[in-house]
Amino acid sequence: MPDWGPVFVAVALFVLLTPGVLIQIPGKNRVVEFGTFQTSGVSVIVHTLIYFTLVCILLLAIQIHIIFSRPIVSTLGVDFGNLKTNGKAIAVHTLIFFAIYSILIIAVNLHIYTG
């Protein structure tokens, strides 16, 4: 049975520690800046060291393991953990993504400028 712990830990830390998305250490104007969506070479190196340290602690010292012994099937016909898809699932998820994206762009007026 595959161990999914390292995958989930690595992806979660990668998303949380991407320089400039949530936090940037060191920032351009301050030591710590939040949500700037900007980065620098020094902050990439600092975030890489933090990422490596946390991955080592969580996977080697604490030994986080997530093992799916069998797919979890609910009574509603929704399958979790079987890693299979079909056209209907892709269409539903595309519509959900489009709806959430539209709400964030139009209703909440959320815009991300990268340049």
Image (cartoon, rainbow, N blue to C red):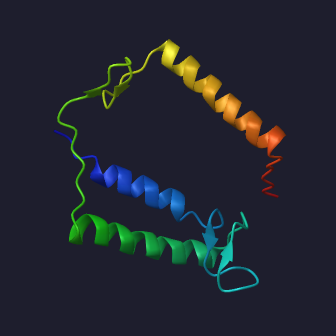
Residue drawn at 45 percent across, 56 percent down: 12
Residue drawn at 48 percent across, 71 percent down: 48
Q: Quadrant of residue 64?
A: bottom left
**Residue 71 appears left or right of 54:** left
Number of dots carrying numbers? 0
Q: Is residue 41 above or below residue 99?
A: below
Residue drawn at 79 percent across, 49 percent down: 110
Q: Is residue 8 above or below residue 91?
A: below
102 and 41: which one is in front? 102
**Residue 76 appears left or right of 31:** left
52 and 87: which one is in front? 87
Residue 11: image x %, image y %?
43, 53
Quadrant, the N terminus:
top left
**Residue 47 appears left or right of 111:** left
**Residue 67 appears left or right of 8:** left
Residue drawn at 80 percent across, 46 percent down: 108
